[in-house]
Image (cartoon, coloured by chain):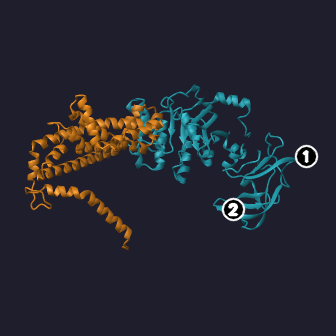
Amino acid sequence: MNATNATNPRDRKSEEQDAFLAIDGLQVKYGQTIALHDFDLHIKTGEFFCLLGPSGCGKSTLLGAIAGFIPTSKGRIHLDRTDITRLSQQQREIGIVFQSYALFPHMTAAENIAYGLKVRQMATSAIDARVSELLALVKLHDKGGRLPRQLSGGEQQRVAIARALAISPRLMLLDEPLSNLDARLRDEMRVELKRIQSATGVTTVFVTHDQEEAFGLGDRVAVLNHGRLEQLGTPEEIYRQPRTDFVAGFIGRANRLQGAMELAGDVPVFRTGNQTFVIKAAVPQQGGGPLTLLLRPEELTIGDSAKVNRLCGRVIDILYSGQTISVRVATDCGEFEALRMSDGQSVPAVGDEIEIGWDADAGHLLPGVTERAP
Amino acid sequence: MNIIDPWSMARRAFAVLFASFMLAPLLVILIMSFTNEGYNRFPPPSYGIRWYIAAFETPAFQQGFLFSLKVAVITCAISGLIGISAAIGIGRSESRWVRSMATYVSLPLTVPNIIIAIMLLQTFSRLSIASSPYGLITGHVLVTTPYVLRMTMTSLETLGRQTELASYSLGASWFYTLRRVVLPQIAPGMVGGLLFAFLLSFDEVTISIFLSLPGATTLPSEIFGYASQGDDPLVTAISGFMILFAALFVLVVEKLFGVLRLIANEK
C-alpha cells in the first residue's frame, strides 16, 4: 500500500531486471516539439498494463515507438532482454489492435486473421487450424467467411484482436480499442479482453483516455501527461494516493483545500484559513511547505455529526445519476462535492443548510498549492 | 402532404438545366449523325445509317481509329505506370518537399497543349526522332499523367495509413503490403485515373495535329483535317461514333470494375 512503490531503489532494481518490456530514457521528437521526455517504463511478463492520459499526453506516441512506427531520438526499448530500438516494425513481432481496427476491407474475417501467417509462409492446413482456433477464442466460429463491413463493430474488434494474436506476438498493443463502441458493447468487450488476455497470457499494453477502462483492465496503470510519467501503480494506489495534482484531477473527482500542517498540542492538524482539520494522511516530504488536502466526493458525509471534521454549508446543486446522488455544497472553504448512494433516504434540497463531514483517515495530502486541474 | 418548396423546385430546375447544358450538344450531334440526307440539318428530315457505313469505309478514318486506339492504350499504360508509382512515392513520403512535387508534376496541365505540341515538335526534330508516334505519345503522357497521379493520391489519402501499419506489424514487407493491402484498396482511384488517361488521349486534338505524320495520324486529327474542308454528314457520323465509343468504353470499364468488386466481396 505504498503509492511510491517505484521509488525504493531495491524495488526498482528488481523491477528492471524482471521487466519483459523495458523502456529507458526514451525520447520522441516531432520536429522541435518533444512528445516524450526521457521516459522510463518497465512492464512485467504477462501483465495487463494500461497507459492512461488525456489526448496529446504522449500515450499514443509511446505506443507507436514501441511498435516501431514512430522513430525515437534517444533511449532504448528492450523486449524480453533483446534491444528492439533499431528493429523494423516487421521484425518486432508485436501485435497491434488499432482504434479503427484497420481490418483489410477486401478480405474476409478468416483471411484477415490468416494474413500474418501467410506472410510467414505457414502451410495452408496449419493456417486453417490456427484461424479456426482463433475464431473460437474470440467467439466468431461461424463468421469467418464474412467481410469486415458485414460484421458489427464489436465483431470487427474481435477479428482485429484475433488477427493480432494469430502471429503469437511477444507483446500486444491496444490503442484505444473500445472508444468506437457504444457503452453496452464497451462493457462486454472489456470483459472479453480480460478473458482473452488471461487465456493467452500475452503481455499487453493498453492505451486509453478513459479512467474506468484503465482501472477495470489494468494490473497496473501509468498516468501520462505532457509526455511525462505522472504516476505508476495499481488502480487502487492511483485513486487513493495520487502523487500529483494532475493525477488527482484526472482520475475521478476531488475536492481540494489549500493549507499547511501544524501541531495542535500533540495532534497534527491541517490548517486552512481559520479552520483546522484532523488528518492522518501521510505528509509528503516537503517539510513545512504549503499543502493541498484532497477529499474524494465519496469520502464526505452529509449531516453526520459523529465525524471528526465538519464544515457547515448550503446546498447549491443536486445531481442524480441513478446509483448515486452528487450534492454540491458551498462552504466558507469553497465549494464541495459530496457523493452518496441513492438508497431511498431523504436527500437535502437546494438551499438547505447542512453539515458535511469526514473521518480523520479520509483524504490525501499533496505537496504545494495546486492549479486547477483540467 | 405535398407542400411545394420553392427551393426544392429551383434545385430541380437547376439540375435539369445543367444536365441539358452538358448533354444537349452531344445529343444534337448523335441525332444529326443518323441522317439519311446528303447534308447536315437538325432535326434530320429522314433517318438512316448510311453515313456511318460511309465513315467506316473511309480508309483514313479506319487507320486513324486504330492509330488512336494504339496511342491511347500505350499512353494509358505509360502514364499509369508513372502516375501510380509517383502517387505511391509522393503520397507516402514524410518529406514536405517531396509532397510538394505533386503540384510541380501537374504543371503540364497549366501549359496550353499547343505550347507543349510546339515544344515537342522542336525537340523531336532536333533529335531526329519521328514526332509520331513518339512525340505524340510523349505529349499525351505529359497531359494525362497528372490525372492518374491526382486520382491515385486522393485514393491513398482517403485510405489512410492504418491498414498499412497493421500489415507491417503482422510481418509483411513493404512490397507485400503494397500488393495485398494498398493496391486493392486504391483500385477505384487507379482505374478512374487510367480511364481518364485513355479518354483524354483518345480525344486529344491539338498535340495530335501538330505531331501527326502521314500514316501516323489520330482519328481526331483526321476528323479535324476532313472537317476543315467543309461541312459534311460524314464528319457528323464519325463524331457520333466517337461519342458512342467513349460512352461504351466508360460503361464497359464501370461494368467490369463493378463485377470485379462484386467477386471480391462475395468470395
Seen in the picture, residue B68 relative to A152 is either above or below; the reply is above
Image coords of residue A213 (percent x, y): 60, 47
* Residue at 9%, 44% in the rendered image: B58
Label 2 SS: loop
Q: Residue A138 carries which label?
A: none
- Count the marks: 2
Side of A70 where B224 appears, left or right = left
Q: Which chain is cyan?
A: A
* Residue at 13%, 59% in the rendered image: B41
Label 1 SS: loop
Image coords of residue A330 (percent x, y): 75, 61
Image coords of residue B155 (percent x, y): 39, 44
Q: Name the residue under label 1.
A: A266
Tell me the distance, in whole angstroms, between the alpha carbons under discs 2 and 1. Answer: 40 Å
Q: Which mark is residue A343?
A: 2
Q: Which picture quadrant has residue B6? A: bottom left
* Residue at 70%, 47% in the rendered image: A248
Q: Which picture quadrant has residue A289? A: top right
In the rendered structure, the colour chosen for chain B is: orange
Side of B141 where A200 appears, left or right = right
* Residue at 83%, 40% in the rendered image: A287
**Mark 2 or 1 closer to N-term?**
1
Q: Which picture quadrant has residue B35? A: bottom left
Pointer 1 chain: A
